[in-house]
Image (cartoon, helix red, strand yellow):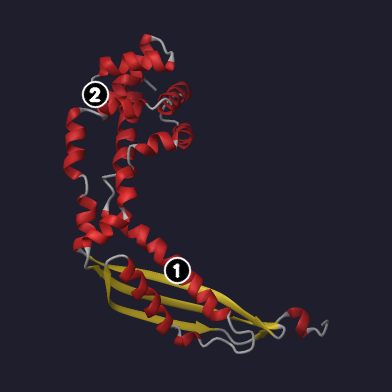
């Protein structure tokens, strides 16, 4: 691949990564980025290695300050011990990514995802499963639910996400939703498993899990400045199934 094509690909790749995951992501995940570049085969192994070196040397952070290609190139020569040609090649990429126009665009978009998230209602889907075991057999338990939630305290949400927004001010409303979706799902997974397995004698009545579900979601909403608007929760379970060893009389 020609160097100009590599430059275009790398600049586009880095810019999209910064806008989706934040600038810190480049340094924190430099080796993952290096492996991805090798897998994509869109740049030469040499260019991928040089990009790895630059990211490990925090050139992406310094480029926010230096902006201009000549200044970035000089910095790369000094901190990475590269010759002028390679430093210039890398500098042209970082100068394109961290141009004044891009940085101004990022400043204007900072926090936009948070504002969009707080203006919408969101539907959290969840599916849970667990197994109750007793007396040489088991019952498989399942539950599907969804809750419609809206934000009633945007400042509380902003406080929740402060650390994430510092790392990535361009965090999208979808990323924010997925963060909360993961947290709520983990809470429900744990609660559903406890509900199904807490009694060693009586089988769980999974059809009645909706009360627990509502309680967990309301607690979650209260913690994060949200309100539960509506929900559906449907639980089901299989018939009691003896274990193979128990069925065959080997107990």
Quadrant in the rendering for residue 156: bottom left
Q: Nearer the viewer, residue 147 or 161?
A: 161
Q: Residue 210: where, in percent of width, then height?
A: 41, 83
**With 178 as the anchor, is 225 left or right in this view?**
left
**Labelled disc at residue 130:** none
Q: Residue 20: where, in percent of width, then height?
A: 31, 44
Quadrant in the rendering for residue 148: bottom left
Q: Residue 81: where, in percent of width, then height?
A: 43, 13
Quadrant in the rendering for residue 72: top left
Q: Residue 117: where, in percent of width, then height?
A: 24, 59
Assign the C terminus to one quadrant of the image. Answer: bottom right
* Residue beneath disc 1: 187
For the residues marked 1 and 2, what is the alpha-carbon distance in whole angstroms? 45 Å
Q: Is residue 58 above or below residue 87?
A: below
Q: Is residue 74 above or below residue 20?
A: above
* Residue beneath disc 2: 67
Q: Residue furthest right?
A: 250
Residue drawn where x is 44% and y is 37% of the image: 29
Q: Secondary structure at mark 1?
A: helix
Q: Is residue 77 above or below residue 160?
A: above
Q: Earlier in the sequence, mark 1 or mark 2?
A: 2
Residue drawn where x is 52% and y is 80% of the image: 195
Assign the N terminus to one quadrant of the image. Answer: top left
Residue drawn where x is 30% and y is 44% of the image: 166
Q: Secondary structure at mark 2?
A: loop
* Picture mark count: 2
Residue drawn where x is 44% and y is 22% of the image: 50
**With 74 as the anchor, is 34 left or right in this view?**
right
Q: Nearer the viewer, residue 12 or 154?
A: 154
Q: Residues within 10 Å of mark 2 (few under 14, many from 20)?
A: some
């Amino acid at each position: 691949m020609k160097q100009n094509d590599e430059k275009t690909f790398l600049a586009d790749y880095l810019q999209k990564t910064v806008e989706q995951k934040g600038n810190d992501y480049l340094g924190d995940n430099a080796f993952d980025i290096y492996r991805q570049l090798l897998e994509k085969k869109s740049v030469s192994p040499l260019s991928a290695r040089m990009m790895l070196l630059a990211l490990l040397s925090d050139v992406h952070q310094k480029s926010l300050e230096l902006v201009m290609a000549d200044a970035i190139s000089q910095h790369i020569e000094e901190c990475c011990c590269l010759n002028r040609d390679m430093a210039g090649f890398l500098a042209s990429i970082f100068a394109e990514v961290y141009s004044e126009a891009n940085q101004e665009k990022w400043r204007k978009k900072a926090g936009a995802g948070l504002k969009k998230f707080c203006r919408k209602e969101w539907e959290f889907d969840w599916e849970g499963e667990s197994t109750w075991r007793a007396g040489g057999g088991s019952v498989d338990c399942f539950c599907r639910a969804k809750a419609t939630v809206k934000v009633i305290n945007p400042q509380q949400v902003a406080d929740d996400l402060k650390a994430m927004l510092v790392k990535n001010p361009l965090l999208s409303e979808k990323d924010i939703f997925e963060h909360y979706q993961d947290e709520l799902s983990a809470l429900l997974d744990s609660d559903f498993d406890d509900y199904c397995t807490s009694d060693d004698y009586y089988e769980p009545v999974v059809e009645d899990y909706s009360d627990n579900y509502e309680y967990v979601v309301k607690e979650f909403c209260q913690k994060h400045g949200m309100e539960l608007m509506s929900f559906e929760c449907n639980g089901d379970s299989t018939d009691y199934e003896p274990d193979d060893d128990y069925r065959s009389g080997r107990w």
